[in-house]
Image (tube, grey):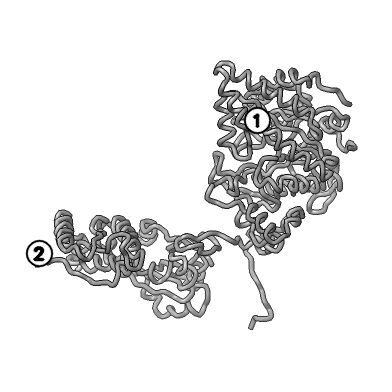
Amino acid sequence: MKVKTPSKLEKILAAGHYAVTSEVGPPRGSDPENITKKAEMIKDYVDAINVTDNQTSVTRMCSLAACIRLKLMGLEPVLQMVTRDRNRIALQSDILGAASYDIHNILCLSGDHQSFGDCAQGQNVHDLDSMQLIQTVRHMRDEGKFLGGGDISRPPEMFVGAAANPFADPFEIRVPRLAKKVAAGVEFIQTQCIYNMEKFELWLKMAGDRGLLDNVYILAGVTPFKSAGMARYMKNRVPGIEVPDELVKRMADTPKEKQSEEGINICIEQIEHLKGVEGVHGFHVMAIEWEEMVPGIVERSGLYPRPIVD
Amino acid sequence: MIVADKKPIEEIIEEIKNHEKILILGCNECVTVCEAGGKKEVGVLASALRMYFLNQGKQVKIDEITLERQCDHEYLEEIRDRMDQYDAVVSLACGVGVQFMAEKYHSTPIYPGVNTCFLGVTEERGLWTERCQACGHCILASTGGICPVARCAKRILNGPCGGSTKGKCEIDKEIDCAWQLIIDRLKALDRLDEYEELCPLKDWSTDRAGGPRKVVREDVQQ
Amino acid sequence: MRLQYPSNIKIILVPCTGKVDVLYILRAFEKGADGVYVVGCLEGDCHFDNGNFRARKRVEQAQKILDVIGVGGERAQMYNLSSSEAPRFAEIAIEMDEKIRALGPSPIKAAKQKAA
């Protein structure tokens, strides 16, 4: 695929390397060190760092400001943006704000419902949905115009991403839904955490058969288990995540003090396996509140050092 | 219909405690069907209030009237010659009726006796559910007759979101995922291919966002 | 059987307790009743399937209202028995009479007398 933006992430993918991304969640406060420390920890092991946008609807430092912090450190942020909290004026405005700092990656999401967060009595906006946000960024970038039609001086140059969950319900529309995002103009996908390899590969094959993978890079999402309890929780409690019984068993059969190590081992095995799967272009390593493990996972998976592109 | 729910009696008492001649005004339309503000509810509320004030040692006159509608001039006019008997009205109509009463009887305080909830249906007796948010530009033709604006918690026009699980919404296992319903329905209609058509950015100016709305029909105006 | 039950109870006949409305119960209190109880058929034995269940719900509704307005929900009760249980009927009447006597006169009755 032709490179269309100055995004380092896009260049790495276009050069045919496996891309590696990870994420940091901004703090419930204004201390910038919280974010810079986490980023410092992983920066040499990933190509880009996602910054979540008030994840699970809990109020936090804004994603844009945290992305700017990363940018000022010379790192490559992926600005996550949800349509829950902003209307089309604010969305476009924040996109321009990010562009002014040369933030070149955006991940378009709808966002969890506010009832899960700390402002359950608040309004939600959803003026646009995630697909329409994808269209909006592409429109701003490619046409150099606002949604309202006016010209943008110095349009944003953003590599446009979205999430996809191969395991969400209903399965039959998982591939059509990806097709819809591709039609909307998405250029890279970071998937939900993958544990059920068979189902993921089936989804990828179906997407490939429809020719979708010629137009979008897929970054497979992986999340190491910290404990057997977490594996069980992910299996039973988190909607849209499928954890096969044998993985839960493998974690449960491991002595408690060795479980976190085993979780890392599983994660590395998953990456090794996914490397052999056609259509996988990279990895999105989500080590939830466990960022310090990212370097080890990347290194042991043979993904270190990271390629250098200009 | 417009679905409403009764306000707690305590709240109504708080609204009217300083008045002495009160009319409880019901509406024979939607709020009667959803058992919140019809003749029967007027009777129950009036009886309860009479006993309450009596018990408080207060002399309060509480009368009951139920009009055919409270959203049309002609019915509201029926009580014009009686309005001077009251120093307050508790309207059990929807918010529309309460306001129209207040516009018409400018100097009499009108208090709401119900919470106006949504535009919905009677799924079964005692269960009313939302169907429409009156966005002003109907898209049901392209969504298999199921409205994502009214029935998706995020009013997502290109759904479902990642929170859809086993056909239910992430916010409540009792609530159907609107997009699952749309997909099932498109399938039943053999139109699932239409799912892949992107729904464009919606013009919300016909919705609440555009300010108070009106429908003008010159062809029927007099 | 010639069973005795308290003579201060006024019986109002309805074709089925399903006919009893919240308003009937409230109006009885408004008119000065100290207590109201509804006697329906045994649960599951309603000739109209669920008349007595409806009555129970309406009694519960009336109880809530009576609590809010300071009359006391316990003054309204629902009982179920079959038509062949005359001794039980008398027993319930005595039980209700004792219960209401323990509660004393309805505050509404007193307030009405005062207001008059």
Residue reaching furthest bottom? B222
Q: Is residue B146 left or right of residue C16?
A: right
For the question of whether residue A4 can be seen, the reply is yes
Work out which quarter of the rendered image holds the N terminus of chain A and state it: top right
| Amino acid identity at mark 2 | Gln
Residue A171 position within the rendered picture, expressed as x and y whole percent measured from the top left: 68, 45
Q: Which residue position is annotated with label 2?
A: C4
Q: Which mark, by number, is residue A302? A: none
| Element assignment for label 2 | loop
| Amino acid identity at mark 1 | Gly
Q: Pointer 2: residues within 10 angstroms few (<14), some, or many (20+)?
A: few
Q: Pointer 1: residues within 10 angstroms few (<14), some, or many (20+)?
A: many
Splitting the image into 4 quarters, where does residue B112 fall? Answer: bottom left
Work out which quarter of the rendered image holds the C terminus of chain A and state it: top right
- Same-subunit check for callouts 2 and 1: no
Depth check, front residue: A310 or B211: A310
Residue A130 position within the rendered picture, expressed as x and y whole percent measured from the top left: 71, 46
What residue is shown at x 56% (from left), y 25% (from top)?
A228
What residue is shown at x 62% (from left), y 42% (from top)?
A112
Q: Is residue A135 left or right of residue C79?
A: right
Residue B26 position within the rendered picture, expressed as x and y whole percent measured from the top left: 42, 71
- A238 in relation to A174, above or below: above
Q: Which mark, by number, is residue A25? A: 1
Splitting the image into 4 quarters, where does residue A296 fall? Answer: top right
Instruction: Return the chain for callout 1.
Output: A
Instruction: Return the chain for callout 2.
Output: C
